[in-house]
Image (spheres, rainbow, N blue to C red):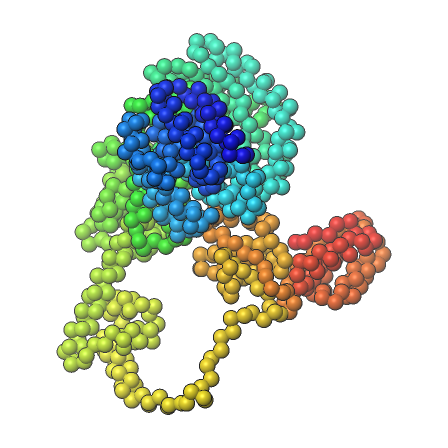
Amino acid sequence: MSKPAIILSIPVLYKKLVSGNPKIMSYDERKYLRNLLKNYYANSEEQNPVFGRTVIDKLNIVDTILNEVGLGKAAVVSVLLQDLVECGDLKVDDIEKRFKTSVSGIITGISRVRELYEKSASLETENFRKLFLTFAEDVRVILIIIAEHLQIMRTLDSYDSESRINVARESSFLYAPLAHRMGLYVIKTELEDLSLKYTNREIFKDIAHKLNETKRSRDKYIYEFITPLKEKLKELGYKFEIKGRTKSIHSIYNKIKKQNTPFENIYDLFAIRIIFDVPIEKEKTACWQAYSLVADMYQPNPKRLRDWLSIPKSNGYESLHTTVLGPQGKWVEVQIRTVRMDEVAEKGLAAHWKYKGIKGESGMDEWLKNIREILENPELNAVDFMDEFKLNLYDKEVFVFTPNGDLHKLPKGATALDFAFSIHSNLGAKCVGAKVNGKNMSIRYVLNNGDQIEVLTSPTQKPNQSWLNIVTTSKAKSKIRQALKEIEFKDAEIGRETLVRRFKNWKIDLDDGRISKLAKKKGYKTVSDFYQAIASEKLDIHEVRDGYLDIEKREQNVEPVESRSAEAFTPDVINSDIPAKEDVLVIGKDLKHVEFKLAKCCNPIYGDDVFGFVSVTGGIKIHRTDCPNAPQMIQRFGYRIVKARWAGKSSGNQYPITLRIVGHDDIGIVTNITSLISKEKNISLRSISIDTNAGLFQGNLTIMVNDLKDLEGIIKKIELVRGVKNVSRS
């Protein structure tokens, strides 16, 4: 779009934007804002805002912020005037005076996020700590960034293929879980679907196609289920809406994976939603009355009742879910809620600001507090940091009580030790067990809903390494690691003081260099570990003395280095170039000579589209982009994915590849295939296994090839052999 067209579009889009939200600003404020935007973009480049977005994109982002997220004036003004502040045309103080709202925190937060993205188009793991620190400053920054990312995902077709994959992966492992944690279920679902569309297009298309094919029968079934229920609900006398909602493609894909079953065997492809429009004081009554009617008409599954009316989720979600046996013996999920609850479910935390005084934001405050505690732990490495952060995103809750009756929420699977740390760090550090419902239990006890917990302590108790395997919450893990570091430091200090005192008695001068050599010789990774061993008496002090004196003696008796002329000197040559005969794999940002292994699950070869996966041991495994495990790795461990590509030449190395061949059991088919392979210059046959049944031939051939080009060539030739129906790579 040309610049004049953009300038003309601004008032049109802006009018559309504010027409649906007339109360958000006064007429003078709207007019002032519109003129600011027109003047700024008339004198600036076409592409200016966050992530290289145009002003049109930015207005669309604001539309999402208003209508899908539910934020107000401060967020809208911050997003639209961000560029003017950054270029110095406008001051934050002037904005706050003009619009009578605080925007400094939001503008600063967005600027920090932009800086991180400018350093790296795809966020690298170490940048996440800074990113989350920015998020934790003002909750609205998270909501704005989610809205901006959603706009990017909706226009991802306009990006190059590499950027599409990177952004889609970020969507899967960061932004969709963030949206879920903020209660933005509609946005979370769209982000997950769009991520799947770009990371696994074939699966996305297949499920979408099958959903479309079954739409007519699904609509018919929903109508049969709803019609008699609607008549009964009318008798309650409340205003209501009842509808069927098809589950998301990503949700269906997860069910297919989890249940290890084809699409055709997934029956709960939709849910029925009943939404009452009633005053706040009648909400619970209406919902439970509706549940009673549904349970009378259709047999409920008692194990599938989910009551988020009595105790809402920590992100504010309220609803009543039940699964009933509908017509034709099919299980159907029914969700019962009110208009207010439905808006909270769609707009999450932001909807609470609309309904002030109802169900406060303490759960979200607690979550952000946990994030800050993780950020404050400098000992946590990048991989651990992401794992700890995700614990806070994917929490399934359990509700327990203190002896005084105070309610506490913890993730499902949390232990008595987790509970102790959730009360106070010192209580957790001294915990020796718990009294659960009047019975003594160990620190390993896994909490159940409704438990009443009293923490038992001992002044001599202190954390140990095994505690990290007992707790599940990020707060407890963080505090235990911190305590272990403090204990190690104290032990190391005691060990050093002991050694210094004994050496002084023996009239031996302690040299840190010799101590370092001795620690290494004894097999300790650090001098600190060495001193700890002395403190705990795992290492005999006399043995340390003898070893130290031995090193001192050898240093004093070392022969002088023989002098050599410069002419006779031959330096050690380090060849930085990999010979042409070897494959070169470039990992990350043009890094070569990085040690890697080829994954056995997909057996990549030279020429395949590949990516690297950083294992927990620090090594890198190379997978094909179409590896069957790739979608799960990207979704669960996206932060461990690194770019990789082949370079150089492939001659010199060969890769084992297994081909599965299916065909008619014709005479000579095996001979023809093996003869064909033997004639190939760069391909050799390693093994072959044949199975025939009812005239059908099935064979697995393991061949050695140089690269993808050779492999594709031999597959085409085998497909031409008489009787062969299909050749596929295992």
Residue 297 in the image: above or below residue 61: above
Q: Is 274 in front, or is 690?
A: 274
At x 85% / y 56%, what residue is drawn?
A: 667
Displayed quadrant of residue 608: bottom right
Residue 420 in the image: above or below residue 653: above
Residue 395 position, x and y percent, is: 39, 39
Q: Is 360 in front, or is 666?
A: 360
Displayed quadrant of residue 19: top left
Residue 714 left/right relative to 54: right
Residue 318 position, x and y percent, is: 39, 26
Residue 513 position, x and y percent, is: 27, 75
Q: In which quadrant will I find the C terminus?
A: bottom right
Q: Is 339 in front, or is 532?
A: 339
At x 55% / y 42%, what residue is drawn?
A: 159
User: Which residue is outermost to the front?
Assistant: 43
Q: In which quadrant will I find the N terminus?
A: top right
Residue 108 left/right relative to 729: left
Residue 486 position, x and y percent, is: 24, 57
Displayed quadrant of residue 363: top left
Residue 40 in the image: above or below residue 729: above
